[in-house]
Image (tube, rainbow, N blue to C red):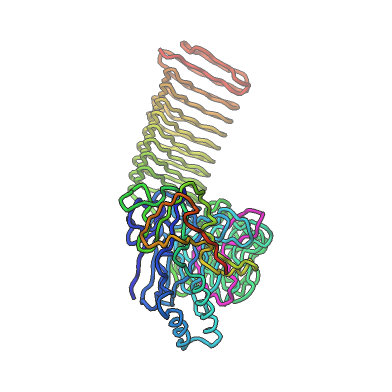
């Protein structure tokens, strides 16, 4: 069995008008040149586009890795941020934790998405624990850049 | 300005997993980073994450630092917790380390991020530029700090590898007391590769790269008090190199390793032990305070020498203590002229005391007690003197090297352990009582002497089921009046081996026994059972119990 730690809350960048607010804050900086402001906006835009989204697979671990606070032989997990999905029979593969990157130039990798794979259909809330019998009960989708 | 503190423990047991305490720690840096992302500038905070591995489990998941808003005073810092700090003496798998396979371990996409006291490595590489730390993108206003850490690359020849890689021309980097090492991969592997605006390296070590120690393809890079070696080219494109030690002798105020050998500067550099020796050229060989107050202590928190910092990550500090108590641990002194003086008590229940190097001394110790441990002194001029009691119940005392002395020991008791002196001119003098219950006394090497153990005060060498053995050239066991062996063995080997003046051997008398080459000069024994000639230069006398 594999256990998936799923990002389950709304990202802080998704607060109403947050993207625009950050851009205005950059514009308001008096110690940056126009060129430097453009770079700062590009950096923030890249981070914004790559941010975690609900359903993103943050980690995958073997069966029994995560547990409730009182389970001393397991590891705690943040119920206010994550959900836990257990999938019996699924092999642990680090590929589930891969980021989506533009690696055309390996010396200058560009992060496109924090996670390549996201879990859909389950409508998870922070703190949820789901055990699904088949991978087909959910859907793990690969994002595009 | 509020400090937000969070905790990461790869071996956390249960807990809330929200990082608010060690008990509720996150189990990986990755989980911490994903959960805690925030706009620190708007919040007016700075964020401080401590890392540990309470049972030694590595953190194996890649971490990308991004999706925060940080500022000059609202920075993000990851720091190894107490007893999990990176060490000058080598990579430590009992402590926290970020150890990622086939990907970069830590990617930085944030403007104000600091790394302190951390071990970060890539354990396997399957593509170029998979690095312990890779700085992907930063804004124009940024400052990345890396201090007191070890960044270990990978020597897999299949891919190009760097301990630190950055290709963003806006980078501003400050790094000190950090070791960038083991980048012996494919051609083009450097300890550090930089495109930046400004990068300042202070008291760092860059060791082992297939290509460059540091390869600068853009920006201003300044290096002070650094040691760079075991590379094809130590400095490539670096702007300022001042008071740095290297194989190439580059820069202003260059420093070369003493005798052209880095073993004369560090304890064991080829195995990652960069403990500074105080007899080389790096010792107090650097510029004074090159960071203008940025740091004043070395990787382990010792003050750098005021006036001239030493080069590398370590400042040599002499020390001493009255009590060293390592219940299950070990005490280690190494290097040249390692001294442990006037120690009243050294107690290692299941631990070990080790002194190695040249002129290693352990003097005046009143009590050296190793329950199941070992005392070991090695190197040239290794001395263990005037110890009143050396008790190694199941442990061992070992002195090796040239001129190894164990003097004036009133009692050497190794119940099931062993006392061992080896090397040239190894001497064990004036021991009043040498009982080895089931253990052994062993002297080996040239001119190994066990003498005067009878002339005034030494009367007894007792080996119940143990062994007294001297081997090598010119080995002597002299003037022992009583050699009491139950079913034990005295063995002298070498050329010429002599056992002389054994005036009394209770009911098992030896007056004179000597061997020169294969010839027995004189021998008398009443109750000795057998004399066996094992080789031309070896004689063994065995005794039965009564």
Q: Residue furthest right?
A: B187
Give percent across and percent down for residue B337: 48, 51
* Quadrant of the frame with the C terminus of chain B: top left
Q: Does the magenta stretch include residue A5?
A: no
- Describe residue B183's horizontal placement relative to residue A69 as left or right: right
Give percent across and percent down for residue B393: 37, 32
Q: Which residues fall within the magenta stretch?
A: B153-179
Q: Which residue is drawn at 58% across and 53% down?
A: B124
Residue B117 in the image: above or below residue A75: below
Q: Residue furthest left?
A: A70
Residue B282 seen in render: no
Give percent across and percent down for residue B383: 46, 42
Give percent across and percent down for residue B63: 49, 62
Q: Nearer the viewer, residue B172 or B437?
A: B172
Q: Which of B475 and B262 is in front in this view?
A: B262
* Quadrant of the frame with the N terminus of chain B: bottom left
Residue B396 seen in render: yes
Q: Which of B46 and B190 is in front in this view?
A: B46
Q: Residue at x 46, y 40 (%)?
A: B376
Residue B300 in the image: above or below residue B70: above
Q: Nearer the viewer, residue B426 or A93?
A: A93
């Amino acid at each position: 069995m594999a256990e998936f730690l799923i990002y389950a809350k709304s990202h802080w960048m998704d607060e109403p008008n947050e993207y625009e607010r950050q851009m205005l804050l950059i514009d308001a900086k008096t110690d940056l040149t126009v060129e430097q402001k453009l770079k700062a906006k590009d950096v923030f835009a890249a981070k914004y586009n790559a941010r975690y989204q609900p359903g993103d697979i943050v980690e995958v671990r073997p069966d029994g890795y995560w547990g409730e606070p009182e389970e001393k032989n397991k590891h705690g997990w943040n119920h206010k941020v994550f959900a836990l999905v257990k999938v019996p029979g699924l092999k642990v593969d680090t590929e589930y934790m891969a980021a989506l990157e533009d690696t055309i130039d390996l010396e200058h990798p560009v992060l496109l998405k924090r996670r390549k794979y996201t879990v859909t259909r389950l409508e998870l809330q922070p703190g949820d624990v789901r055990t699904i019998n088949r991978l087909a009960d959910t859907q793990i989708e690969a994002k595009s850049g | 300005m509020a400090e937000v503190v969070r905790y990461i423990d790869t071996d956390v047991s249960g807990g809330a997993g929200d990082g608010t305490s060690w008990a509720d720690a996150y189990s990986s840096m990755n989980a911490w980073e994903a959960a805690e992302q925030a706009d620190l500038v708007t919040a007016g905070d700075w964020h401080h994450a401590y890392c540990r591995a309470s049972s030694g489990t590595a953190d194996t998941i890649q971490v990308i630092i991004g999706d925060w808003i940080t500022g000059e005073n609202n920075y993000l810092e990851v720091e190894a917790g107490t007893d999990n700090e990176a060490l000058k003496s080598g990579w430590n798998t009992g402590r926290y380390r970020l150890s990622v396979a086939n990907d970069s371990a830590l990617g930085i996409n944030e403007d104000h991020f600091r790394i302190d006291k951390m071990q970060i490595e890539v354990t396997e590489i399957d593509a170029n530029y998979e690095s312990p730390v890779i700085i992907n993108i930063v804004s124009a206003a940024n400052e990345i700090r890396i201090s007191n850490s070890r960044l270990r690359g990978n020597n897999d020849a299949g891919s190009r590898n760097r301990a630190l890689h950055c290709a963003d021309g806006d980078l501003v980097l400050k790094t000190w007391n950090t070791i960038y090492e083991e980048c012996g991969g494919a051609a083009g592997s450097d300890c550090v590769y930089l495109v930046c605006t400004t990068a300042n390296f202070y008291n760092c070590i860059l060791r082992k790269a297939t290509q460059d120690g540091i390869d600068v393809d853009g920006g201003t890079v300044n290096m002070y008090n650094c040691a760079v070696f075991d590379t094809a080219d130590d400095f490539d494109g670096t702007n300022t190199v001042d008071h740095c030690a290297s194989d190439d002798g580059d820069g202003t105020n260059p420093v070369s390793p003493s005798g052209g050998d880095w073993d004369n500067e560090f304890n064991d550099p080829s195995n990652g032990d960069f403990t500074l020796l105080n007899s080389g050229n790096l010792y107090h060989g650097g510029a004074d305070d090159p960071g203008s107050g940025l740091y004043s202590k070395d990787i382990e928190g010792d003050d750098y020498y005021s006036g001239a910092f030493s080069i590398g990550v370590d400042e040599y500090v002499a020390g001493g203590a009255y009590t060293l108590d390592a219940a299950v641990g070990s005490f280690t002194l190494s290097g040249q002229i390692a001294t442990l003086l006037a120690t009243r008590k050294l107690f290692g229940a299941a631990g070990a005391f080790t002194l190695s190097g040249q002129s290693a001394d352990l003097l005046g110790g009143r009590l050296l007690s190793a329950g199941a441990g070992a005392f070991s002194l090695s190197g040239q001029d290794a001395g263990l003197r005037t110890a009143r009691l050396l008790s190694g119940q199941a442990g061992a005392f070992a002195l090796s090297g040239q001129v190894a002395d164990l003097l004036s020991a009133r009692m050497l008791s190794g119940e099931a352990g062993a006392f061992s002196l080896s090397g040239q001119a190894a001497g064990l003098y004036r021991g009043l009582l040498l009982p080895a219950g089931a253990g052994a006394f062993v002297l080996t090497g040239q001119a190994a002497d066990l003498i005067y153990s009878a002339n005034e005060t030494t009367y007894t060498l007792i080996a119940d089921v143990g062994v007294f053995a001297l081997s090598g050239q010119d080995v002597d066991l002299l003037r022992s009046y009583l050699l009491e062996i139950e079913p034990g063995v005295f063995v002298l080997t070498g050329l010429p081996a002599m056992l002389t003046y054994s005036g009394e051997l209770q009911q098992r008398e030896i007056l004179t026994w000597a061997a020169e080459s294969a010839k027995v000069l004189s021998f008398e024994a009443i109750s000795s059972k057998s004399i066996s000639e094992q080789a031309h230069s070896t004689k063994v006398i065995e005794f039965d119990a009564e």
